[in-house]
Image: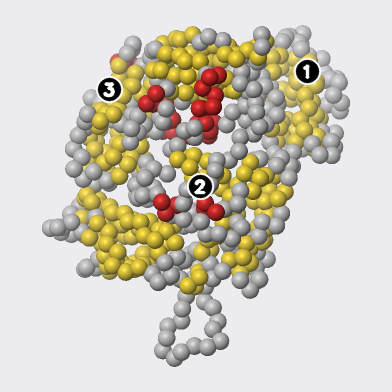
Amino acid sequence: MYDSRMYDSAFRLSLAFFCGLTISAPAQTASSGAIAGIVVDAGSNSPIRRSVITLSTVEAQPQDAVAWTDSNGRFSFGYLPPGRYQLRAMKNGYQGTSYGADTFRRPPAIIQLTAGQIRNDFIFRLQLINSITGVVLDEDGDPLAGVQVMASTPGFQRQKRRLLPGQNTMTDATGHYRLSGLAPGRYAVAATHRTYPVVKTHPEATAGEPQPFYSYGEQYYPGTDRAEAAALITVQPGKEIPSIDFRLLAQTAASVAGKIMAPPGAGSVKDLAVNMISEDFGGFANGVGVSVSPPDYTFGSGPVAPGLYLLVAQASIDGRLYRGAQTVDLGPQGLRDVAIAMEASVDLAGSVSVEGPDAGKYAASFVNLSPGDDIPWNAPPLRANVNKDGSFKIANVPPGIWDIGVSPVPPAGYVKSMRLGDRDVLTEEMTIRPSTAEPLKIVLGTRAATLEGDVLQGSQPTRAVIVLAPEGKFRHVTSFYRNVAGDEKGHFEIKNATPGEYRLYAFEEFEPRLIQDPDFLKSFEKSGIPVTLREGPNASPSLSVIPAGPAPLAPGPVPPTNSRPLGARP
């Protein structure tokens, strides 16, 4: 599937600092203006010194000027030409904010400054940063240092529910941790100590028996090793959530052993390696190295905590890259006789062509692939340059699901089609198998769809976030979605859209990540307007804004990780 991620003339602002909100700067020219204001603590209403204020022009290539507040919390920018501006305020220990964005789900306001206008009415009320704190102890109540603690947000990735990794930190020598700078929302907090074996003292031991190893493993608050049972902790603006504590219990460590199954008739095997990756925490824990012994290619891990793991084997066989993957559910008793079958990579050949007006002026430079499944890629990037005739070849592409990137796309263009043989891989997953021999044909268009319109609240224009959502069978194609912020007059413009059938929404508040939720827009369908986009300019009827409701809650429980089959999209 196409991956949308793989996509001075000196304008100077003079800044000045003032003692009061009434502008008393040196005389300005008749046409120049000024913007000034104050920054205060939202809780105490006291001024905040040395806040960083950024003034940006609203242009295709914005220009920035920076000022710092004085001891009275005041700031000012002078000698400003007429134009459109945005203001942002930041200070260590506080949540940054933009003027006009009461919540992070609203677009920032645009300040329209006319010739000679002086605006000194801007007030920023900064909230203290949100944080979660606690302590990690062992079963005896002793502090554990060096434990990784992470706050994950329930969300969607590839339209499937999962915990999305977020802020993380390490416990100090006293076992304490602090997760700072969290956006308001709900979080699952987990602690991991998986890769460090623990030796416990036994009051009795039998001569000749090996010393058992233990591991603390991982744990979600409030004391579970499964994501679906994690408590979701609500973080409010400017609040600290204390006492999110963990007591990690040492479990008997286990190991896994097995054999790499080379294909029949394989000759020289080189650079064989096996990596073991925790699946329970979505890759939260680091990979664990596994030793491999020639000539029969048996492998074995050291002691690790029980849990769900992904074993990934990779080797060069007869000069070609081979890879194999196997998910194992490791219990305290360990696993033996695990077989990992190796499959050959393929050389993926194809072409990139350009269609539309002035097509001859444009050409792609490279095509690249990134993993579209749960199997990580720890080798050099899969990338190929595009030749002058549009052809390319990406060598050694292992079997699996891969996302496709092509660059550059024409400035006003779009990705028109991607086909692997007769399969559409622009809107569906591209699965590579050892037998894949079809060419990958990519077509770029020079004339994407654009859409302009206006948003009203009642009869008055209003700012909103406009979402363009594909209809029908393309609802799952996130690269087709577009969202833009309207201006202060309610006007919006969407560029570089793929022609097709869509529904258009105007939200007072919106979180772009909610697009990944396949059910999110269903409750708003009656408020959306159907539009058919064709190449080139398209006009939109006026949109009515969808008022902000309660802040959207995090999705429901995360499905059990061990229910996800190998190769399923995360």
Query: How far apart are the two marked residues, 2 and 3, measured between alpha carbons?
Result: 42 Å
Q: Is residue 510 above or below residue 451?
A: below
Residue 119: numbered disc: 1
Q: Badge 2 local density, few (<14 within 10 Å), some, or many (20+)? A: some
* Nearer to me, 404 or 253: 253
Q: Amino acid at mark 3?
A: Ser
Q: Is residue 273 above or below residue 539?
A: below
Regarding mark 1 in the picture, which secondary structure is present there?
strand
Q: Amino acid at mark 2?
A: Val
Q: Badge 3 local density, few (<14 within 10 Å), some, or many (20+)? A: some
Residue 413 placement: quadrant: top left
Regarding mark 2 in the picture, which secondary structure is present there?
loop
Residue 305 appears left or right of 387: right
Q: Quadrant of the C terminus?
A: top left
Query: How far apart are the two marked residues, 3 and 1, measured between alpha carbons?
Result: 52 Å
Query: Disc 2, disc 3: CB below 8 Å?
Result: no
Q: Earlier in the sequence, mark 2 or mark 3?
A: 3
Residue found at x 45% / y 40%: 160
Residue 540 appears left or right of 100: left
Residue 558: numbered disc: 2
Query: How far apart are the two marked residues, 2 and 1, measured between alpha carbons?
Result: 49 Å
Residue 85: numbered disc: none
User: Which residue carries the number 3 mark?
Assistant: 353
* Nearer to me, 447 or 399: 399
Q: Is residue 123 above or below residue 337?
A: above
Q: Quadrant of the N terminus?
A: top left
Q: Position of residue 483 (x, y in %)?
A: 52, 24
Residue found at x 63% / y 73%: 140
Residue 44 placement: quadrant: top right
Q: Position of residue 41 (x, y in %)?
A: 80, 37
